[in-house]
Image (cartoon, rainbow, N blue to C red):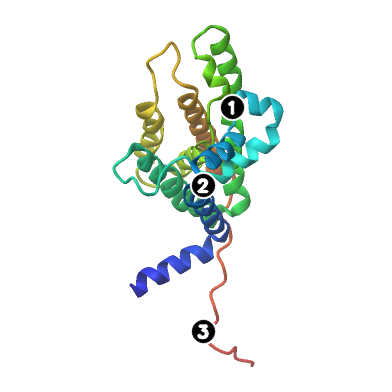
Amino acid sequence: MRKAARALGTCLSRSPVTAGYTVLLLATHLWCTAVLSTAEAQRLLLGVSTHLDNLHDRPLRVLAGSMLFFDGTLTDLASEAFVGTLITLGLGVAVCLAWLERRYGPGRAYGIFVLGHLAATLLTVPLIQVALAHGWYPESVRHAPDFGISYGAEAVLATGALLLRRGRWFAAAGVVAWPVLGGDWSGVLPDFTTVGHLLAAAIGFVCGAFLLRTAPRAAPAPAPAAGPALVE
């Protein structure tokens, strides 16, 4: 138990931004599920959803606010939503984003996360508009709930997969398989969230390739002195 606590403390101290962000995501989730009523929580989450109507009326608010919540569950362990929580909040943020922060610093790590979230969200907009114009998507898509960290998590997962020394291509295949296997491919086009996750993965792969070629690792924290320095 002491070793586990020590390892957790080391991880938190070496990735303080991710530790704080993870706590924030857990806090907003608990606020919606344990404090607010169902109707209040729905109004809040609809207010930060990045659907077409919100992006047209208040783009900055919803693009930023959407990153403060995750779309999943912490209690229904047998559900598909819990698997999504494990992938996005667990593997994506708590593991991969923390690792990128330790290795390359918080600026690069969160730059990739935010870029994946913003670019994938905005790049799906013309797809949705074309699909609505041709009747490929139902009109309800225009104001359907769409919030959370999954695009950003997908981007950092793709980046982290490409930076692995071993099992790189196996991990990259797993990153792509998640939206492909979990998405809806029944219509003329796959659902827009599947497209968004694949776009986020592509962004993450590009960022990973860029880091491999150009970015040095963040300097490690200096080790504590073993004792008083000797003066000669």
Q: Nearer the viewer, residue 89 or 120?
A: 89
- In front of the other: label 3 or label 2? 2
**Residue 148 visible in the snapshot:** no
Kind of residue indicated by mark 3 = Ala
Q: Which residue position holds label 2?
A: 32
Above or below — where is 124 with respect to 111?
Answer: above
Query: Is label 1 in a helix, a strand or a loop?
Result: loop
Which residue is pictured at 56% across the width and 67% down the height?
221
Disc 3 crowd rating (10 Å Cα; few below 14, some 14-19, many 20+) is few
- Asked if the residue at tag 1 contacts the one at tag 2, i.e. Cβ–Cβ closer than 8 Å, the answer is no
Query: Is label 3 in a helix, a strand or a loop?
Result: loop
Q: Is residue 122 left or right of residue 202?
A: right
Disc 2 crowd rating (10 Å Cα; few below 14, some 14-19, many 20+) is some
- Asked if the residue at tag 2 contacts the one at tag 3, i.e. Cβ–Cβ closer than 8 Å, the answer is no
Upstream in sequence: badge 3 or badge 2: 2
Upstream in sequence: badge 3 or badge 1: 1
Q: Is residue 60 left or right of residue 226?
A: right
Disc 1 crowd rating (10 Å Cα; few below 14, some 14-19, many 20+) is many
User: Furthest-top residue in view?
Assistant: 134
Which residue is pictured at 49% across the width and 41% down the height?
38
Quarter of the view holding residue 213: top right
Q: Which mark is residue 226?
A: 3
Which residue is pictured at 46% across the width and 68% down the height?
9
Q: Nearer the viewer, residue 23 or 113?
A: 23
- Count the marks: how many? 3
Kind of residue indicated by mark 2 = Cys
Q: Nearer the viewer, residue 46 or 171?
A: 46
* Mark 3–mark 2 distance (CA, rounded to whole Å): 48 Å
* Mark 2–mark 1 distance (CA, rounded to whole Å): 20 Å
- Asked if the residue at tag 1 contacts the one at tag 3, i.e. Cβ–Cβ closer than 8 Å, the answer is no
Q: Which residue position holds label 1?
A: 51
